[in-house]
Image (spheres, helix red, strand yellow):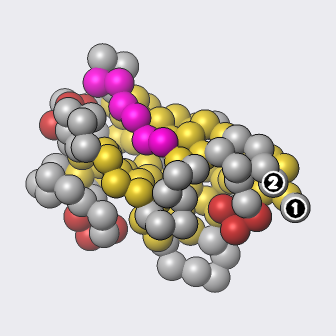
């Protein structure tokens, strides 16, 4: 099984950019669709972006569409999420997840393995 570990979170001013990384150990990374989710205080975990096993197809939540880019490097067992033009409402804990079965997973239930999360705080 694969174990994702996120990094790259921090405190950023509104309008800035952030690049999150998720390194996955164990398992065969290229066998997993990868996704990013986030959870703000008092809110449910929500989908942000996902990428297929071969890295060709991506999908974004409407809230980040046009500002976010998800990419993966299967030679490095790593998936990335860059968000530009950050807004205070982007604040939350960002989680990386790996899904074995679904080709185009967007819900939390479609992912099998989760990282511990990395905090992103956007100040206004």
User: Is 73 colored magenta in this rendering?
Assistant: yes
- Residue segment shown in magenta: 69-74
Is 88 situated above or below 51?
below
Position of the N terminus by quadrant: top left
> Between marks 1 and 2, how big is the CA–CA gap?
5 Å
Q: Which mark is residue 14?
A: 2
Measuring 61% from the left and 59% from the top, which residue is drawn there? 93
Q: Which mark is residue 124?
A: 1
> Is tag 1's residue or tag 2's residue first in the polypeptide sequence?
2
Q: Is residue 69 left or right of residue 107?
A: right
Is 13 situated above or below 26?
below
Q: Is residue 83 left or right of residue 75?
A: right
Measuring 28% from the left and 39% from the top, which residue is drawn there? 2
Measuring 47% from the left and 36% from the top, which residue is drawn there? 80
Q: Is residue 123 left or right of residue 5?
A: right
- The answer to which quarter of the image holds residue 59 is bottom left
Is 19 situated above or below 95?
above
Position of the C terminus by quadrant: bottom right
Marker count (numbered) = 2
- The answer to which quarter of the image holds residue 79 is top left
The majority secondary structure of the magenta stretch comes to strand
- Element type at marker 2? loop
Circle 2 Cα neighbour tier, 10 Å, few/some/many (<14 / 14–19 / ≥20):
some
Is 22 situated above or below 15?
above
Residue 22 can be seen in this image: no
The answer to whether the residue labelled 1 contacts the one labelled 2, judged by CB atoms less than 8 Å apart, is yes
């Amino acid at each position: 099984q694969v174990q994702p570990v996120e990094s790259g979170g921090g405190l950023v001013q509104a309008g800035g950019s952030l690049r999150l990384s998720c390194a996955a150990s164990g398992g065969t990374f290229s066998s997993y669709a990868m996704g990013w989710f986030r959870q703000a205080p008092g809110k449910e975990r929500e989908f942000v972006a996902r990428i297929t096993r071969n890295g060709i197809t991506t999908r974004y939540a409407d809230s980040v569409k046009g500002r976010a880019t998800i990419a993966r490097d299967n030679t490095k067992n790593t998936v990335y999420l860059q968000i530009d033009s950050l807004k205070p409402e982007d604040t939350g804990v960002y989680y990386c997840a790996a899904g074995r079965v679904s080709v185009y997973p967007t819900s939390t239930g479609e992912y099998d393995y989760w990282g511990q999360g990395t905090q992103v705080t956007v100040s206004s």
